[in-house]
Image (spheres, helix red, strand yellow):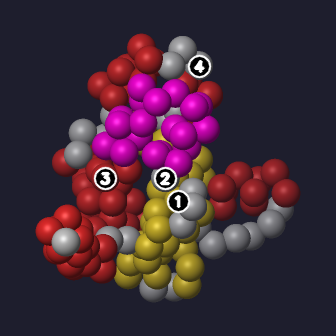
Amino acid sequence: MKAIALFIFSLLLALPTCAQTPETNTFYLTKSVNGTVDEIAPIVKAELKKHNFGVITEIDMQKSLKEKLDVAIPAYRIYGVCNVKLAYQLMQLEDNIGVILPCKMVLKQKDSKTVEVVFIDPQHLIEITDNKKINAIGLQVKRAFEKVLAEL
């Protein structure tokens, strides 16, 4: 009986936290914010920096698709996001982890006033390696991305 009461109490404590976390899907974390991609990009990069992450690659899909296919789409940028210390730890534990590094983040203009910020769910991504030694790092990265989204 005592164990059941503790379990229910734990669930009740977790409810407010769950209600405040960003939307979660099976392979990504997302949040919509007011602004344009040009306005939001430096804000997201600053929040990432607070959590020891940096942007190491950037692809402007709007520009690339216009140049290569002559099609127009709203602003859509793909970023490679990395915490080099954690990346190094992963490389020590999983030799071929580089095929899924860096983590991806997308900023896409949904309408004239709204940007969707999307992160890959690194915990889900790391699970495909079936290497239990690196699961904790995936969870650590996921929690950092959730904090970045919550702070936007």
Q: Secondary structure at mark 4?
A: loop
Q: Earlier in the sequence, mark 1 or mark 4?
A: 1
Q: Amino acid at mark 2?
A: Asp
**Circle number at residue 28:** 1
Instruction: Find disc 2 in the rendering and name its residue.
Output: 121
How busy is the neighbourhood of tag 3: few (under 14 within 10 Å), some, or many (20 plus)?
Answer: some
Instruction: Find disc 4 in the rendering and name its residue.
Output: 96
In the image, 54: left or right of 68? left
Please check the rendered image and state whether residue 140 is part of the magenta-colored stretch, yes or no. Answer: yes
Q: Residue 90 at x, y = what percent? A: 42, 24
Instruction: Find disc 3 in the rendering and name its residue.
Output: 143
Q: Quadrant of the N terminus?
A: bottom left
Q: Amino acid at mark 3?
A: Arg
Q: Residue 144 at x, y = what percent? A: 29, 50
125 shown above or below 115: above
Whether residues under marks 3 and 4 lie with C-beta atoms below 8 angstroms apart, the answer is no
- Residue drawn where x is 47% and y is 45% of the image: 122
Q: Which residues are magenta?
A: 122-141
Q: Earlier in the sequence, mark 3 or mark 2?
A: 2
Q: Amino acid at mark 1?
A: Tyr
Q: CA distance from mark 3 to mark 2?
A: 10 Å
